Image: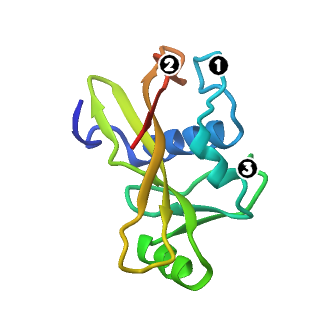
Amino acid sequence: MSGEADDVSRNIIAMLQSIMLTSVLQQQPLPGQTQPVRFPDLAFITESPTVLISIDNVVGQFNAADIDKPVEVLLESEIREAAAKSGDRAYIRFQPTEERDGQVRIVLEVRIAPKEPDIQPLGLGGIRATFTRRPSGDWEATEPPVLFGF
């Protein structure tokens, strides 16, 4: 897979990003999978009163109706400013979406913006999933998601 998602509409990518985010935060299986999505660094996000998401690589509006806490999509600079004022802030960042041969790869990572403004955000862990459209038109993760740490 390579390149930005040129062939897949922004609406589909936004939908897949929303599906990924909701599955991760609710620790539920991705569509087409049976095992819930769990990774240790997710606690930094779930224990926070607000889910912060960097707007970098977000292509549309999130459907946050199924998430039971407020979601804020901010510039990474705004997240860093908030951390400088109130202490380290955990947030979610999507990597650029990749598309090839009808498959879409979405990567979500958990990061921490430190209180010290001169220190770069710390990458913790993340998840990568590849989605394929089924003949029914629904999108499914075609293989178990890959968890990673930095």
Q: Looking at numbered disc 2 in the image, what kind of residue is underneath it? A: Pro
Q: What residue is at 35 percent from the left and 79 percent from the top?
A: 118
Task: Give the residue number, with chain letter if any, for mark 3.
Answer: 67
> Is residue 54 positioned above or below 45 on the image?
below
Residue 147 pos. (x, y %): 47, 31
Q: What residue is at 40 percent from the left and 48 percent from the top?
A: 10
For this view, does 66 lie left or right of residue 38? right
* Count of picture labels: 3
Q: Looking at numbered disc 3 in the image, what kind of residue is underneath it? A: Ile
Q: What residue is at 50 percent from the left and 44 percent from the top?
A: 17
Q: Residues within 10 Å of mark 3 (few under 14, many from 20)?
A: some
Q: In this rendering, which labeled residue sits more in front, label 3 or label 2? A: 2
Residue 13 pos. (x, y %): 43, 43
Task: Give the residue number, with chain letter if any, for mark 2.
Answer: 144
Res. 28 image quadrant: top right
Q: Residues within 10 Å of mark 1 (few under 14, many from 20)?
A: few
Q: CA distance from mark 2 to mark 1?
A: 8 Å
Task: Give the residue number, with chain letter if any, for mark 1.
Answer: 35
As drawn, the label of residue 130 is: none
Q: Secondary structure at mark 1?
A: loop
